[in-house]
Amino acid sequence: MSVTEESIVKPPPFKGFSASKVIYVPVDSNSHIIKTSLQERAKKEITFPMGQLFHLGDRIVLYGCVGAPSAVLCLESLIAAGAQEIVILGLCGSLCRRARLFDVVSVVEALADEGTSSHYFAEKKEFYPSLELRERVEAQIRSAGLPILTGSVVSTDAPYRETQSWLDKNLELGLDCVDMETSAVLALAEYHELAAAALLIVSDELSGSGHNKGFMNPRLEDQIQAYFLPIIKNI
C-alpha cells in the first residue's frame, strides 16, 4: 500500500460541528470534571458510540475516543468539517524518574508503537508537534505561574503488554512517557498539514518494581482543573 494513494473511503464531516480549533480529550478524571465543565458551557453536544463532541463556539472538544484508531477515525471527520489545529489533553504513564506522578509534560517528540500512523507514513516512526502551537500552549501555562516539563512519549495500542523488555527498550531510546494516542494524532496532523500539540498529565508510573497508579488520587483532578480547563477555554 502506498500512503500517497487517495483513499476510496472518505470521512464524513460532523454536521454542525465545524471549527478550526479542536481539543481532543481521550480520558477524564474519575469524577468527570472535564465533562461536567463542557456540559455547562457547550452550545450543543452529540454522543456517538466512541465518545462525544462539544461545540464551544470557536472550538470543538472531542471527548473520549480512547486509543489511536478511534482518535484518528473521529478526527478525520472533524478535519473534513474544517479543523486546522488539534490540541491533545491527555494522561500518560511515566517511564523514567524525570517525569513523576502528576507532573505535566508538553510533548516534543512521539514514537509510534501503534498501528494507525503507518497508514499515513509507512516508513516513519517519529512525529513532532507544531512548534508554534506547542509554544502557545506552554506560554499559557507559564503565564499562569504553573510548572511544566518537556518530554517524549511512545504511543502504544496495548497497555497491558508493557513488559520489562518493552520498558527497557524505550528507556534506551530516551523516552519519558507512554500513552495511546499522541503519535497517531501527530502523524494525522502532519499528513493533512495541520498544527497539532500534546499536553499530558502523568497519571501512573512504570518501573522495574511495578506499576504506581494515581488515577484515583485527588491530585490528578487538581492538575486537570489547573492545566486542562484553562487550555480548553482559552487556547
Image: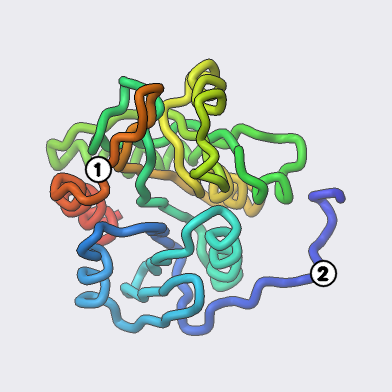
Mark 1 or mark 2: which comes first in sequence? 2
Residue drawn at point x = 57 percent, y = 33 percent = 111
Q: Amino acid at mark 1?
A: Gly
Which corner quadrant of the image does residue 13 belong to?
Answer: bottom right
**Badge 2 is on which residue?**
8
Q: Nearer the viewer, residue 228 or 65?
A: 65
Rendered location of residue 105, percent (x, y): 33, 35
Residue 111, compared with residue 51, is above or below; it is: above
Which structural element holds mark 1?
A: loop
Label 1: few (<14), some (14–19) or many (≥20) C-alpha neighbours in 10 Å: some
Task: Name above or below for residue 64 compared with residue 55.
Answer: above
- Give left or right: position of 118 versus 26: right
Q: Which mark is residue 214?
A: 1
Scheme of colours in the image: rainbow
Across and down, in percent, residue 153 comes to: 47, 34
Q: Residue at x 53, y 78 (%)?
A: 14
Residue 118 picture quarter: top right
Q: Residue furthest front?
A: 209
